[in-house]
């Protein structure tokens, strides 16, 4: 069995962290106006993140004008030693029509309760009418204070 490189090990840790969480805080900026919003996401094996949103939202309008984004993902904890989280910089864009079906399946795999909603429900109708976006990371930092105060592992894509 071939041993993983340090970068492969970090990427694997990042993918596990992404799979184990559901909500990201997305930061966008346009015309010097920053904006932050929380969104459910799914992720793939290349650490790309996918979310669903209406193109009329402020964050999607920002992405249309300036696709460079930042995001963070973390859980709420009560001690310094428990702090673990992820920060990233990347580019966001609408998922191409060609990829939409498999992205929807991946997203529904992470959030199976969506499949159980009544077909006429407002949430499900909005879901199908909305766009899917992908964030392709350029850089990710995984912070894990259980390994030491301020411990960081980083990967550049």
Image (spheres, rainbow, N blue to C red):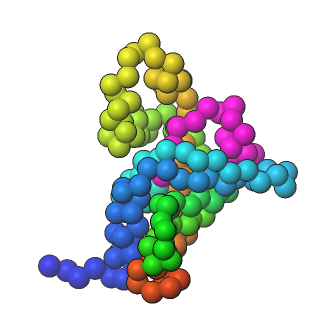
Expressed as whole percent of the image width and height from the top left, the position of residue 134 reads 52, 47
Expressed as whole percent of the image width and height from the top left, the position of residue 21 reads 41, 55
| Residue 93 shows in the view | yes
Q: Is residue 74 left or right of residue 14?
A: right
Q: Is residue 146 left or right of residue 65?
A: left
Q: Is residue 19 left or right of residue 40?
A: left
Residue occupying the point 77% across, 54% down: 34
Is residue 50 located in the magenta-colored stretch of the structure? yes
Residue occupying the point 45% across, 86% down: 148
| Residue 66 against residue 83 in the figure, above or below | above
Q: Residue furthest front?
A: 78
Residue occupying the point 59% across, 54% down: 25
Expressed as whole percent of the image width and height from the top left, the position of residue 86 reads 50, 66
| Residue 129 against residue 88 in the figure, above or below | above
The range drawn in magenta is 49-65
Residue nearer the viewer, 54 or 20: 20
Q: Is residue 142 left or right of residue 117?
A: right
Is residue 91 located in the magenta-colored stretch of the structure? no
Residue occupying the point 49% across, 44% down: 40
| Residue 64 shows in the view | no
| Residue 66 against residue 52 in the figure, above or below | below
């Amino acid at each position: 069995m071939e041993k993983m490189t340090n970068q492969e090990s970090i990427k694997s840790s990042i993918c596990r962290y992404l799979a184990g969480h559901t909500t990201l805080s997305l930061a966008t900026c346009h015309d010097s106006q920053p904006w932050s919003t929380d969104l459910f996401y799914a992720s793939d094996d290349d650490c790309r993140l996918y979310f669903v949103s209406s193109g009329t939202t402020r964050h999607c309008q920002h992405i249309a004008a300036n696709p460079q984004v930042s995001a963070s993902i973390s859980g709420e904890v009560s001690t310094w030693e428990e702090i673990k989280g992820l920060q990233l910089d990347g580019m966001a864009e609408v998922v191409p029509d060609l990829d939409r079906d498999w992205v929807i399946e991946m997203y529904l795999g992470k959030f199976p309760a969506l499949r159980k909603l009544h077909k006429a429900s407002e949430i499900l109708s909005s879901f199908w009418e909305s766009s899917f976006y992908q964030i392709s990371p350029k850089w990710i930092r995984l912070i894990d204070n259980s390994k030491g105060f301020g411990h960081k592992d980083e990967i550049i894509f």
